[in-house]
Amino acid sequence: MKSILSVLVENRAGILARTAGLFARRGFNIESLAVGETSDPTVSRMTIVVDGDAGVIGQVEKQLNKQIDVIKVRSLDGGETIRRELALIKVAVGAQNRGQITDITAIMKANIVDLSPTTATVEIADTPERVRQLLGLLEPYGIVEMARTGMVALQSGNNGIGE
Amino acid sequence: MKLLTGAQILIHTLIEQGADVVFGYPGGAVLNIYDALYEMRGEIRHVLVSHEQGAAHAADGYARSTGRTGVVIATSGPGATNLVTGIAAAYHDSVPLIAVTGNVTRDLIGRASFQEVDIVGITAPIVKRNYFVRQTEALADTVREAFEVANSGRKGPVLIDIPKDVTAQQARWSPGPRFCPRPAPRPPDAEIRAAAEMIEKSARPLIYSGGGVAFSDAQDRLRAFAEKIRAPVCTSMMGLGAIPASSPHNLGLVGMHGTAASNMAVSRCDLLIAIGARFSDRVAGNRLKFAQDAAILHIDIDRSEIAKNVPVDLALTGDAGECLERLTALLPDGPSPQKAEWLHEVLRHKAMNALPDAAGEGDEVNPREVILALQKVAGPDLIVATDVGQHQMFVAQYYPFQRARAFLSSCGLGAMGYGLGAANGAAVGNPGRPVALVTGDGSFHMNLQELAVSVTNKLPVVVTVMNNGVLGMVHQWQNLFYGGRYSSTELGRETDFVKLAEAFGAAGLRIRKRSEILPALTRAFAVGGPCVVDCVIDARQRVFPIIPPGAASEDMIYSEYSEEQR
């Protein structure tokens, strides 16, 4: 089972290594981990997607909460959440099939951000499901390389863990 | 193809990779491993230590002195954490070392179980690579890869952490080939040519050699290179022995406690050729002023060392020996009057600015004289280990190392307590060769329990304790830089090192007078087993010259009176 953890931490050197170490030691598998500043530059938000049963997730949450540098931890599994991921996908395309890529990107609300005679780089910022769907559509053309940010997420509406 | 337990796979693979001895200490999490060691005791020797730190230093001393890979085994938790200083020492000095730690069974990992620590997390910054082995099937290849990693490129320690149940489970094992280090980077011909041109154009070249020369077994090629370009050679501590002390090109140690000749040459040269050296703060105390009038050619196998501490004009990333060979072949034979004049000037400076006199006054025991006597008594085969402090600097300054791998010292980490373990390891790895540990009464107290190991294994280690009742180096700094406020450096201990040696089952001797130095050391080496020689020296002995930390070579202090002398 995949779970999303939203973690507010002090924006300090070494905290990323410390948090990642916490997962590694117990053999928990981090699927993705995205970090960035919040509206308060002294606080960073980590969005961690981790694979494990409820017991594992509960343990991770408690271990994170114990860290002095961790301000708040919230599991985003229940309730409505806005989830987004950014991906850059470089596809092998020439003049003859570039039109098909243009169609796919338009329908998927993605953008072509770079073109060369033999490649097109597609940018998508969407839910992980839509990113996966786009990848499936582009795969037959040949993916040269790809960079993904990992998921970031916030609770919808007025709900939040505050900064 | 055999069905073996993880523990048997570990030992079989260690033997397959060339390990003939392991240093270690048993415990709960490594019971299976020790059972396999018992089973294979005809093919691999286990040396039991007194404390795991001693095992790590022993594996280090074994590796430095033999050029082989040191192996150390410790149990989980405290066994593993006791290795940390030894692993860090090996990392600082690029020593190939395999540390094997047991851990609790997989289902207990991450539960703060009895004797559980995250040693992979703890050692991450001080190893080239570490592994947590989750599957018995992966164990053999992990060990093979560890040997390859430890010995490829710039050498260093690797840690393998194995849960107890992984050592109990069975898996198929079949023998594999001995590791083969990955090929070192090879600089293109154009770069070698550019370096040769730089050397040809220079009038005042100086070679600064480090530990990389010995790790590449390039001593002969360094000598041929130096002779061809008529360059003087200074060395870092790790580089001692890279050029024979008796070579007319040798200027000795460079840096903080380096010779006046070495440091003068650094200031005066127009081309500094650094080989397998890293411009550490003990060499280049003031990075901005170090060799500021010279172009710098840096030869190193580790790309990340290039331009790390000082900017360089040209770098060759590759194996020291290979680079030197290719460079030497390109350089023309024949005289270069400018270079010959430069070498002559440097050697004249060396002759006029010798290190402080090694002879004691009257009956006084001068530690420098004891160090010179070691070589006279034990001969050129002697391996010298040290601890850390004044005695270490006296050895680095005065002992005439004629070959590489004969000096064992924690140069980068500066770990007091390193020496006795290292000396034991060297004695195990070099049967028939005499081994001396030069230590101080401060350092010796840190790990003297390893004397029990020397006794049990009848290791011919002569321990010379420079006993001045103070923590000499810190005492010296308090004298020079803290107005003589001797905070916690006057030991006030009553330890009788002769009785202590005897209590451990070793021989004990004492030197109180200058005239006793040679007879006592002669007797000590004649024992053929461990012997502790208590050398009573004056606490006012200071290591000179010294370049104060952060200062440049022109700020060198030659003696306690040098201010007034100027």
Image: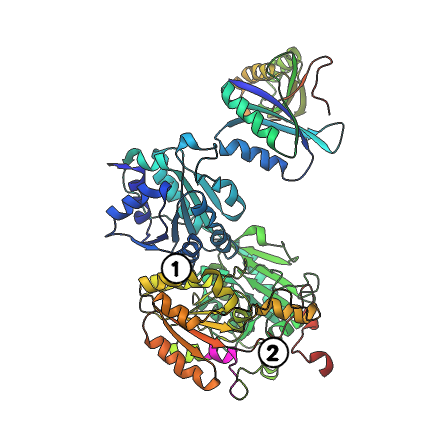
Q: Secondary structure at mark 2?
A: helix
Residue B440 is situated, as x and y percent measured from the top left of the image, at 50, 69
Magenta span has B197? no
For the N terminus of chain B, which image quadrant? top left
Q: Which mark is residue B346?
A: 2
Q: CB under 8 Å between callouts 2 and 1?
A: no
* Numbered range of the magenta stretch: B363-372
> Between residues B411 and B197, which one lies in front from this camera angle?
B411
Q: What amino acid type is highlighted by mark number 2?
A: Val
> Between residues A5 and B404, which one lies in front from this camera angle?
A5
Q: What amino acid type is highlighted by mark number 1?
A: Tyr
Task: Kindly tell me whether residue B480 is visible in this rendering.
Answer: yes
| In this rendering, position of residue B406 left or right of residue B204 | left
Q: Residues within 10 Å of mark 2 (few under 14, many from 20)?
A: many
Residue A98 is situated, as x and y percent measured from the top left of the image, at 61, 18
Residue B103 is situated, as x and y percent measured from the top left of the image, at 41, 39
Q: Secondary structure at mark 1?
A: helix
Q: Which mark is residue B62?
A: 1
What residue is drawn where x is 45% and y is 43%? B77
Observer-side mark, 2 or 1, equals: 1
**Depicted B52 relative to depicted A101: above or below:** below
| In this rendering, position of residue A13 left or right of residue B458 | right
Q: Chain of mark 1?
A: B
